[in-house]
Image (cartoon, coloured by chain):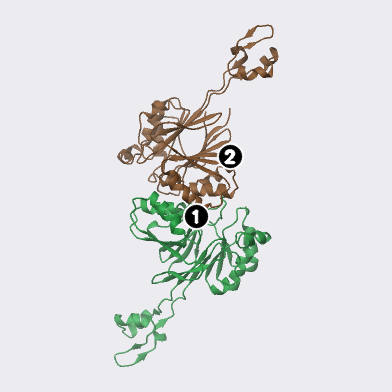
Chain colours: A green, B brown
Amino acid sequence: MEKFEVNILGCGSAKPTTRHFPASQVVNVRDKLFMIDCGEGAQIQFCKSHLKFSRLQSIFISHLHADHCLGLVGFVSTLNLLGRTAQLHIYLPKGGEEAFARVIHFFNWEITFQVIFHEYDDKRSEVIYEDRSLTVKTLPMEHRMPCCGFLFEEKPSPRHILREMIDAYEIPLSEINRIKNGADFVMPDGRVIPNERLTIPADPPRSYAYCSDTKYMPALANRLQGVNLLFHEATFCEADLQKATSRYHSTASQAATVARDAGAGQLIIGHYSSRYEDERVLLNEAQAIFPQTILAQENLCVKVE
Amino acid sequence: MEKFEVNILGCGSAKPTTRHFPASQVVNVRDKLFMIDCGEGAQIQFCKSHLKFSRLQSIFISHLHADHCLGLVGFVSTLNLLGRTAQLHIYLPKGGEEAFARVIHFFNWEITFQVIFHEYDDKRSEVIYEDRSLTVKTLPMEHRMPCCGFLFEEKPSPRHILREMIDAYEIPLSEINRIKNGADFVMPDGRVIPNERLTIPADPPRSYAYCSDTKYMPALANRLQGVNLLFHEATFCEADLQKATSRYHSTASQAATVARDAGAGQLIIGHYSSRYEDERVLLNEAQAIFPQTILAQENLCVKVE
């Protein structure tokens, strides 16, 4: 199966601790790297996860709180130091270009590549990135400021054509793509070989949703039906529900409820408040509702499957 | 002896590695904390060194290269999150306020304390901070951009008055300070007790010099005569002398030469280029010239004595 995995670079929240870095992840889709959020120290964590700077395609910023984006200037400065030439696309909410363009320029007045800011509309879900194998859609969150999660979806792949059928029916190279896309094969003598005999279905497309920061949104489950892997913030435990609600954050139970109601394959929780020295309290709470829950931790790599 | 120690938070250079954080240190003088440089991740390292945010007095930035100051916005944001009320003084070269004031404001539009920028003249050595027990002086460096090191000097302490002499001569409380400052004591009967009989000298004032980033400056040794503890950058080893010279950095041998010629008590080297996986090559080179050399490392605490 093609590579599709999520690397956690940081899963703490705003207040620094000795246990966590602030929010940052890297999604690896077929060795193209997409960064989600870029908290302070993301570049150091990127190295620790043995990721390649040259493979980075784009950066997606969920919102403009310090713990989700203050690593951006350093990250861009390092790409510049490494002599990057490819354009870098940064997707972020309105106001993001104003916040970062000047200061990136200040520290990189000689820059070897173009930084292109794309400010998305945080009010509606839209496709903000697309290539041959992937789309990335925004997921409006409910937080104290404009904030979006991101849904990474593989595009459906063509069917697999069976090697032995190519040989048996002497299928010419020129027909292969049509058959992969579902066509039957017509033999030189006019006989029609149905596609189902020649191919097997491709692996179903996989998806990853990143939901941070947000208060509990029951409606999210509908939008994420059948998602393979879900990251959902779980800043607080249920005993601190009131804090969660007033600060527009979620509890571990709420994160698990979204995962359960969406029929997700697996749930990663993170964005831990600094108050929990041992995050197993959050894990236990979530697993009671959705057993396929794991705790995010720095430099963890999770396959989407 | 009063506390005077240096905490290394980061001792790498611009290119990130898994081994080091970028430049940052905290000087602890009698439990007042003074930060020197504030590379990305400084706030995390501050926690790891078990330092107290509430004790921080001021921040001194040597120059405006990314690896020496990109932790500043995050650090100030955290102080704000923690509800600081005391003014924060940031000393930095010209242009520093323009680089940081806007972006600090962007991420802290509700701020609980005043941030006061002081842009120093990088061309001449001057006292930029002074309190009852300490002065901090700039040390102009020779780098690719305006850059200053910093010299922390304790002020001379008054002499220690001997407990048994107070009793023997029935010295009244009102005389104590004068005697500590060198005065003789005149008895009610007119007899003069010389100060040397009543007191012993205070510990001599101690000093710490931070020299980063700079090319080799032979004249520095004169300005730092007798410094107790010297941090000097040693980005390269002698085999890479040409790189050091062209990039306005120093080699480990050059750092050690400055320490030797200044008659320093101890030398810490740091600001290592990412190319050296094992920094003992730098240590060995420096110790051949100045044996009292140690390697900086993250969360190392060195006493000034």
Q: Nearer the viewer, residue B132 or B14?
A: B132
Vertical position of residue A50 compared to residue A158: above or below: above
Q: Is residue B206 left or right of residue A196?
A: right
Q: Chain of mark 1?
A: A
Q: How many marks?
A: 2
Residue B213 is situated, as x and y percent measured from the top left of the image, at 39, 39
Q: Give the Cα separation between the discs numbered 2 and 1.
A: 25 Å
Task: Specify the label residue A245 is tagged with.
Answer: none
Q: Which residue is mark 1?
A: A39
SS label for mark 1: loop
Kindly identify the amino acid type of the residue bearing the numbered disc 1: Gly
Residue A171, by quadrant, is bottom left
The residue located at (62%, 63%) in the rendering is A252
Residue A17 is situated, as x and y percent measured from the top left of the image, at 57, 50
Task: Specify the label residue B55 is tagged with.
Answer: 2
Q: Nearer the viewer, residue A210 or A242?
A: A242
